[in-house]
């Protein structure tokens, strides 16, 4: 590219992730604000490969529901910097933890769900499985635009199922068929795993804690995996609308073949409520 990292001034650290740091930066000439993800990948070929995969995916995507990637720089010494669209509110995870939960009314959640589904529908149409949908990977801005971020573990499907079965991603949000394809993997194509994760995400945002664990409990991975595979699918507490309850049920079918697709869910009554 014609520009370089030197054209941007660092304003503050936004957060730390796997092997990298995300900064808020300003383009010196235009004063436009961006997020710059700097990953120290010089010595680790596995991480380097993962970053280039993420870059490749981000470069190909162009959707208002997926965080935009504007540029990529390779710094001397091997660091890689990804210039992204800045999302000024942060993640849905931090938003839900820093507020008393009252902002996530059903109506707000319908707007959140619709945007994530638009993003997933776009990705799935382009044969991309995200594989790590969770509140910490969904970014928000002041307009309450919600966009899908973090493609570190996502994969473009080259019609190979083996690629989907490799053990990556966050276990907590993984669908039953990823642990136990024999029981829950009828018509398994990988895309439906993202829908399960979306269902858990919506449930978490409504309940204020991860739905497969009591509030405040630390994850015990073995117990969690048992709950996902052998327990009943989690569901909403009493007092929600039928539309919301049904929506969550359509996402959290344990059998991946029965789960609705992103495009089907977009026409579910819960998503078709008026936006304002
Ligand atoms: P991880 O590798 O753990 O998924 P990232 O390195 O992608 O996390 O991001 C770390 C943190 O930086 C996020 O939790 C978020 O708070 C912040 N962040 C990431 N991307 C952006 C962005 N485009 N705009 C604003 N904040 C961001």
Image (cartoon, rainbow, N blue to C red):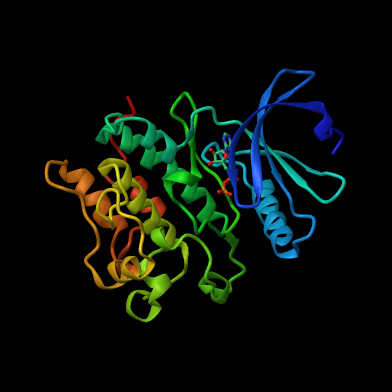
For the point 83% across and 30% down, the residue is 6
User: Where residue 114 sits in the image (x, y, percent)?
Assistant: 38, 40
> Is 19 located above or below residue 97 in the figure?
below
User: Where residue 193 sits in the image (x, y, percent)?
Assistant: 42, 62
For the point 40% across and 77% down, the residue is 181
For the point 56% across and 76% down, the residue is 162
User: Is 216 left or right of 180, judged from the image as shown?
Assistant: left
User: Is 128 left or right of 10, judged from the image as shown?
Assistant: left
User: Is 73 left or right of 148, judged from the image as shown?
Assistant: right
User: Is 97 left or right of 59, judged from the image as shown?
Assistant: left
Q: Looking at the image, can residue 270 be seen?
A: no
Instruction: Please name whichever residue, 95 or 177, is drawn nearer the observer in this view of the structure.
Output: 95
Question: In which of the image's four quarters is ligand 1 placed?
Answer: top right
For the point 50% across and 46% down, the residue is 137
User: Where residue 203 sits in the image (x, y, percent)?
Assistant: 29, 48
Instruction: Please name whichever residue, 166 or 255, is drawn nearer the observer in this view of the structure.
Output: 166
Instruction: Quadrant for residue 103, please give it.
Output: top left
Q: How many labels sit on residues?
A: 0
Instruction: Quadrant for residue 208, please give it.
Output: top left
Which quarter shows the N terminus? Answer: top right
Identity of the residue furthest to the bottom in this view: 182
User: Where residue 101 sits in the image (x, y, percent)?
Assistant: 29, 33
Which quarter shows the C terminus? Answer: top left
């Amino acid at each position: 590219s014609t520009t370089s990292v030197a054209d941007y001034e660092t304003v503050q650290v936004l957060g730390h992730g796997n092997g990298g740091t995300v900064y808020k930066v300003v383009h010196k000439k235009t004063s436009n604000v961006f997020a710059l993800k700097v990953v120290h990948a010089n010595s680790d070929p596995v991480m380097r490969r993962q970053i280039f995969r993420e870059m490749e995916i981000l470069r190909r995507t162009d959707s208002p529901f997926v965080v935009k990637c504007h540029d990529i720089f390779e710094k001397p010494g091997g660091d890689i910097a990804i210039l992204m669209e800045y999302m000024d509110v942060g993640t849905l995870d931090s938003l839900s933890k820093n507020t008393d939960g009252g902002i996530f009314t059903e109506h707000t959640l319908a707007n959140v769900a619709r945007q994530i589904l638009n993003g997933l529908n776009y990705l799935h149409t382009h044969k991309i499985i995200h594989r790590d949908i969770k509140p910490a990977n969904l970014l928000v801005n002041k307009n309450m635009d919600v966009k899908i971020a973090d493609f570190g573990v996502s994969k473009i499907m080259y019609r190979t199922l083996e690629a989907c079965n490799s053990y990556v991603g966050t276990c907590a949000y993984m669908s039953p068929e990823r642990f136990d394809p024999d029981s829950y993997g009828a018509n398994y194509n990988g895309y439906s795993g993202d829908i399960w994760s979306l269902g858990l995400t919506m449930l978490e945002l409504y309940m204020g804690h991860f739905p497969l664990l009591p509030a405040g409990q630390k994850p015990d991975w073995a117990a969690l995996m048992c709950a996902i595979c052998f327990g009943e699918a989690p569901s909403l507490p009493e007092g929600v609308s039928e539309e919301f309850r049904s929506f969550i049920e359509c996402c959290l079918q344990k059998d991946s073949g029965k789960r609705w697709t992103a495009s089907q869910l977009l026409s579910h009554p819960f998503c078709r409520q008026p936006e304002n």
